[in-house]
Amino acid sequence: MSSTVNAGTSRDERVLVDALRARAARGRLTAEAVVLAQGRFQTPSPWPTGMPRRGNGGASFPNAWRIARRSPDLAYVEGYVIEADGTVTHHAWCTDGHGHALDPTWPDGRARAYAGIGMALPWVAAVQRRTCSRTRFPGVLDTAVQHARDADRVLTYGVPAEALLPLGRDLSAGAPPRPSGARLPDLVA
């Protein structure tokens, strides 16, 4: 199967993108804008048998990080999900090479659509070291990490091209473009 999972966009995916657009319009530097600009859809998939066990239901970022580091066929993805009740949540999960979202935190079926950015593990580890967030990892796109510890690097410039993993289907939504002449900083510590 190719990285394009499905040619169409589901209703849940459209609702998720609309919610991200509305949130991104509220402020200049938002994680939602970064996901709209660089993210991809992943298809919700059941947790495979034989995979490491799922983690704590309230700790998606460390759970996804732990599973991605232990499973060479999976990537760490951070972004947003829409739950069955319509709630849009900042979340992390794993994705395989075919764009299947494998959620190590929530039970199958809780999230209806996933839109996020696949990130190279060495780059995520460098962000953790630089922001001192290794012990309590709140995610790369966490606003507290970005505003207080990382000088808004990712919110301003996005995830650098060498750290992006193009897994899943392109979001058909745009985001505000980068400021003209903005250069991606060297984010590897």
Image (tube, rainbow, N blue to C red):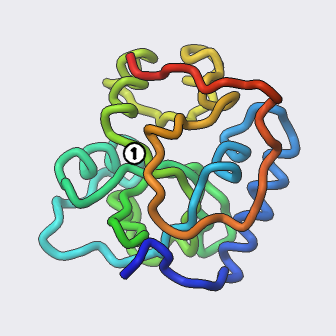
Helix, strand or loop at mark 1: loop
From the viewer's perspective, tell me whether residue 70 is left or right of residue 184.
Answer: left
Closest to the observer, 144 or 169: 169
Residue positioned 66% across, 73% down in the render? 13
Q: Which residue does the numbered mark 1 point to in the structure image?
A: 59
Residue positioned 41% across, 56% down in the render? 93
| Three-letter code for the amino acid on which mark 1 is drawn | Ala
Residue positioned 61% across, 23% down in the render? 153
> How many marks do you count on the picture?
1
Residue positioned 84% across, 53% down in the render? 22
> Looking at the image, can residue 153 be seen?
yes
Residue 114's quadrant in the figure?
bottom right
Residue 73's quadrant in the figure?
bottom left
Crowd band around label 1 with a 10 angstrom C-alpha radius: few (<14), some (14–19), many (20+): some
Query: Where in the figure is residue 186, as x and y percent of width and height?
Result: 50, 20
| 167, above or below 60, in the image | below
